Amino acid sequence: MNYVTEQILGSLRDARIRKGFSQRELSARSGVPQSHISKIESGDVDLRMSSLIALARLLDLELFVAPRKTVPAIKSIIRSSNATHNNGLSDESEPMSPAYQLEEYDDD
Amino acid sequence: MNYVTEQILGSLRDARIRKGFSQRELSARSGVPQSHISKIESGDVDLRMSSLIALARLLDLELFVAPRKTVPAIKSIIRSSNATHNNGLSDESEPMSPAYQLEEYDDD
DNA sequence: GAGAGTGATATGTTTTTATATATAATTTTT
DNA sequence: AAAAATTATATATAAAAACATATCACTCTC
């Protein structure tokens, strides 16, 4: 598994966890079987672009290609975005995932 | 074909052309058949992540996922990068594709 | 208009994702 | 430690990409 792939799959997993989704829940939302999500995250399959985009979208991520020379700048933006776990100045950001969960929730 | 897909495929085609590669040449460099590259560019196939990464790499592009809220900033970076067709202040940028080609070149 | 280069189409085969489903293994919670 | 939730594996099937190869249509140049 090459570096870029690892990066992307890692981002997917991190985003899922940051949103407080289990693989099952992401499965329910995306229609992709949990077993397949597991394989995806562990790099056992070379997933298709449409699947990647669909999963990313559910996790509030977007897929891109960028010129190599812009990579450092972009990574910097992403990094500082991830560093900002809901500081006061937030905009239309996603609701923070709770540190613990009192009741089970079933939206969707 | 959704918006993100279109964006990405468009970027691939643009980058290929900016580098002065024909589909045949990209095929030779990547090992992906020209016929398949044609289908990819016209959105006839839902290509795999590894293929996407491989093609992107040959075109000096890199694949990413980024948090949705960072998208405008990132697009802005990419835009200005593309706007700068070799202005004087360049760094380690790729050699400019020539406006015309005298001889055929075969590196690789 | 012949020849060369380019991109799109066509066909048949192989490989692999994606799906469905079940269950095992692991981690977390009570 | 028992129960519950989460993730990893396994198997079988269907669908689609990837591949190899050939050819067609189009444009451009000589």
Image: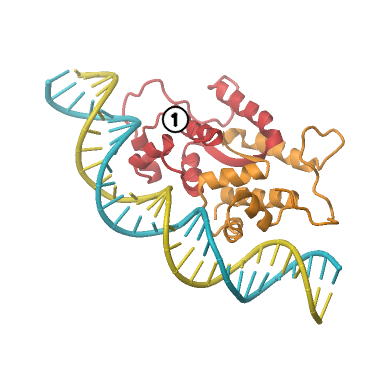
Chain colours: A orange, B red, C cyan, D yellow
Q: Nearer the viewer, residue B61 or A29?
A: A29
Q: Where in the figure is residue A54, as x and y percent of width and height? A: 58, 44
Q: Secondary structure at mark 1?
A: loop
Kind of residue indicated by mark 1: Lys
Chain letter of disc 1 in the image: B
Seen in the image, is C3 located left or right of residue A44? left
Q: Nearer the viewer, residue C6 or A24?
A: A24
Q: Where in the figure is residue C29, as x and y percent of width and height? A: 83, 65
Identify which residue is drawn at 61% across, 23% down: B80
Identify which residue is drawn at 48% across, 36% down: B59
The C terminus of chain B sits in image quarter: top left
As drawn, A44 above or below D27: below
Q: Where in the figure is residue A56, as x and y percent of width and height? A: 62, 44
Identify which residue is drawn at 39% across, 42% down: B29
Seen in the image, is A46 located left or right of residue B98? right
As drawn, D7 above or below B99: below
- Residue D28 placement: quadrant: top left
Q: Nearer the viewer, residue D16 or B61?
A: D16
Q: Is residue A86 visible?
A: yes
As drawn, A26 above or below D12: above
Kindly identify which residue carries mark 1.
B19
- Residue B97 placement: quadrant: top left
Seen in the image, is B9 located left or right of residue D21? right
- Residue C15 placement: quadrant: bottom left
As drawn, B14 above or below B108: above
Q: Is residue B108 visible?
A: no
Q: Where in the figure is residue B34, as x and y percent of width and height? A: 34, 40
